[in-house]
Amino acid sequence: MKRFDAIIVGAGQAGPSLAGRLTAAGKSVALIERKHVGGTCVNTGCMPTKTMVASAYAAHLARRGANYGVVTGDVSIDFARVMARKDKVRFDARKSNEDWLAGMQGLTLIRGHARFESPTEIRVGEELLSAGQVFLNVGGRAVVPDFPGIGDVPHLDNVSMMELTEVPKHLIVVGGSYIGLEFAQMFRRFGSKVTVVEKGPRLIAREDEDVSAAVRDILEREGIAIRTGAECIRFFKSGEGVGVAVDCTAGGPEILGSHILLATGRRPNTDDLDLDKAGVATDRRGYITVDERLETSVPGIFAMGDCNGRGAFTHTAYNDFEIVAANLLDNEPRKVSDRIQTYALYIDPPLGRAGMSETEARKTGRKLLVGTRPMSRVGRAKEKGETLGFMKVIADAQTKEILGASILGTGGDEAVQSILDVMYAGKPYTTITHAVHIHPTVSELIPTIFGDMQPVE
């Protein structure tokens, strides 16, 4: 048996950073990774997909060249170069992570599949490891829904989409949420015919209805067909390749295409760790139950990142590391509930979100102030020729606390950060209304929107 001070399972966003802090504190650490260092973000998520989004944006902008007085001629896609560029970005990032870990004194990187044998013992192949503390950073994977006929047709997920060698003739995206919509617009700009099939009544259902409608309008303007209310989805083979049968209020009963992307959610990678042997509790969906300090039901075992159900983003996984390190190493009592919800949807233009949606804010029973402004009234957006979308801010009418913001528009993923920082500072919205921002920017209109807020019933 090999003994360590700590064992970390998973080399995603939280694991390696925690290994760095623990080894710097003089502890011996085993980091176990069964596949690729860097986790989803580096290998199949943020970095490769946003690299492809950038290529798709370049193609879209080139096609609009005449709008800017630029003669571009016919625009075509060299898909092999698109994918090579994507691979270079992710492989460089992976190697950078591997080199960092290789030079970390006190760290042993072990490749293989970890399984618990007790609360303090983990087996990896023939090796048995033990430690007083165990940290799980095992991530998640795409859900394969139990739709009729799903086993009869080939289908893609967010991982296999990264390995395509040609642009699909007609991509059918099943699932109208964040991952599905990013791929839908991306491949439409690469030249695919694209249809999005969503079971619910609208896209990205967790967002406010006005945001959902605006996103749909943006996608439909680019020729993406969207079928919502698809209550009875089933799959079958067709002459063109694959087919999806839907039961919608409008449109034909079947959609024929060349490729199917399943983007219907994710699940945690917790089902093959033998958690029961350690006594680690999970909820009904398989997410590891944790407290405010991210400790599981077993003292000394912690869960970080996607597997704990407390956030499904790279930034929340990294913040999980910060919370664990602060409590264990810095005597700083940080907790998960201090975190303000924030994320982005990387279609073009992007959606930047912070705090509550208007729908969520209304449920609190507070008296609200809401301000909106279309991007068509933002000077920077007009100068760039990118005026789709709008901005919305929400505040408590009595306390002046900022409750949330949605910025759907050019630069929205960056502009929302200034609102988020004021929220973390615990300052009233008047802090922003009194601020002087740079002109011309998207952010300069944020004080105006807060100053123009109106009461809502």
Image (cartoon, rainbow, N blue to C red):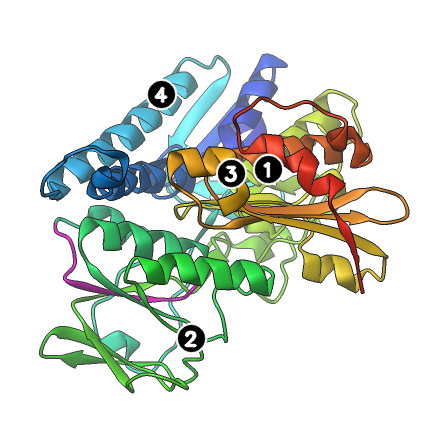
Residue for point 78% across, 47% down: 395
Q: Which residue is mark 3?
A: 413
Separation (CA) of disc 1 from disc 4: 30 Å
Separation (CA) of disc 1 from disc 3: 6 Å
The answer to whether one can see residue 204 in this image is no
Q: Residues within 10 Å of mark 4 (few under 14, many from 20)?
A: some
The answer to whether one can see residue 17 in this image is yes
What amino acid does circle 3 point to? Asp
* Eye-nearest disc, 2 or 4: 2
User: Magenta part of the protein: which range?
Assistant: 166-177
Residue for point 16% across, 79% down: 237
The x, y position of residue 116, in whole percent, is 53, 47
What amino acid does circle 1 point to? Val
For residue 228, the mark is: 2
Cβ atoms under marks 1 and 2 closer than 8 Å: no
Horizontal side of residue 77 vs 203, given as left or right? left
Q: Which one is nearer the viewer's eye here, 240 or 386?
A: 386
Separation (CA) of disc 2 from disc 4: 42 Å
SS for dot 1: helix
What amino acid does circle 2 point to? Thr
Horizontal side of residue 205 vs 405, given as left or right? left
* Eye-nearest disc, 1 or 4: 1
Q: Which residue is mark 1?
A: 416
Residue for point 32% across, 83% down: 251
Separation (CA) of disc 1 from disc 2: 29 Å
